[in-house]
Amino acid sequence: MKNILLAISILGIASFHTLNAQEIITKSEPYTAHDKGKFFISWGGNREKYSKSDITFKGTDYNFTLTDVSAHDKPKGWHIDYVNPSKMTIPQTNFKMGYFISDHYSIAIGVDHMKYVMTQNQVANIQGYYPNSGTYDETIMGNQNQIVLTEKFLTFEHTDGLNYVNTEFSRHDDISKLFKIQNTDKVQIKLNEGVGFGILYPKTNAKVLGKERHDDFHVSGFGTSLKAGITITFFKHLYLQGELKGGYINMNDIQTTASATDTASQDFFFFQRILALGGIFRI
């Protein structure tokens, strides 16, 4: 009986020390060791590049397609408008809010507020017909197959903006050890990759064939994207994030005038460079 009691006592003491040691290890584990259950939110800016696209314009008395049309973004540069609540939609911005469903995977919703401006006075190939040819200061060249896109003939922008409202699914991997960072609660570096899809909700600023300028929000199509980036987190909760993001946009229902019969359609690829500030926390 004494031997049995002694054995139980030894096992009890050993178990106590084991549990105590595990508790100490758990308590000393950094906050950044696990992300499951954390929320995050970010705000930043971007620059974009666009592939050439074919744009078709249709109305009651016209139907023509411009091919290989070039476009560019409309950067604001380093400006106070990025943090001015009354002017936050003037620059090219990115908003994102999400949740970690596990230590390595997150889901998020966001708005990529890009700006798309058709390059004015470029030469484009044209097919189709429109009324009053030659009265819009346009120059027809190459046996009627090319045209100079003058302001009187056409202005075409998604500048408030080319709004890609999307959902993202991403993976995150801690690479702090590669930089010999020991305390990730002070500085942590992660790689992130993801895929996204969503709708295009642009505010298209257009003036077609001398018609009244139109500038209104309208659900115009869909988009999909891939991204990769680096996130540097400081003191557990504040992070700086840089991302490269590319994707495909298809807008088959762009409103160009106040009339529902006047529409445009186009599809193209885009490439974004994004820099954002954010916060990560557990509620």
Image: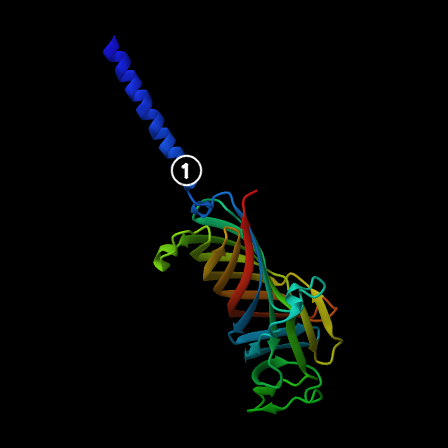
Q: Position of residue 61 (x, y in %)?
A: 70, 76
Against 73, is 8 above or below? above
- How many numbered discs sit on the rendered protein? 1
Residue 278 seen from this side? yes
Q: Where is residue 219 in the image (x, y as percent from the top left)?
A: 64, 61
Give the left or right position of residue 192, taking residue 12 as reference.
Answer: right
Query: In which quadrant will I find the N terminus?
Result: top left
Against 139, is 77 above or below? above
Residue sitting farthest toward the left: 3
SS type, badge 1: helix
Nearer the observer, 179 or 204 = 179
Query: In which quadrant will I find the C terminus?
Result: top right
**Neighbourhood count class around disc 1 (C-alpha, 10 Å): few under 14, some 14–19, many 20 upward:** few
State the image quarter where residue 199 is shown: bottom right
Give the left or right position of residue 177, taking residue 198 as reference.
Answer: left
- Amino acid type of disc 1? Thr
Q: Where is residue 224 in the image (x, y as percent from the top left)?
A: 51, 60
Against 204, is 3 above or below? above
Residue at the spot x=51%, y=60% of the render?
A: 240
Question: In the rendered image, which residue does mark 1 sit on?
Answer: 26
Residue at the spot x=48%, y=63% of the render?
A: 243
Residue at the spot x=53%, y=73% of the render?
A: 50
Please say which color scheme the image uses.
rainbow
Nearer the observer, 109 or 103 = 103
Give the left or right position of residue 29, taking residue 216 as reference.
Answer: left
Residue at the spot x=28%, y=12% of the render?
A: 5
Residue 255 seen from this side? no
Q: Position of residue 214 (x, y in %)?
A: 73, 71
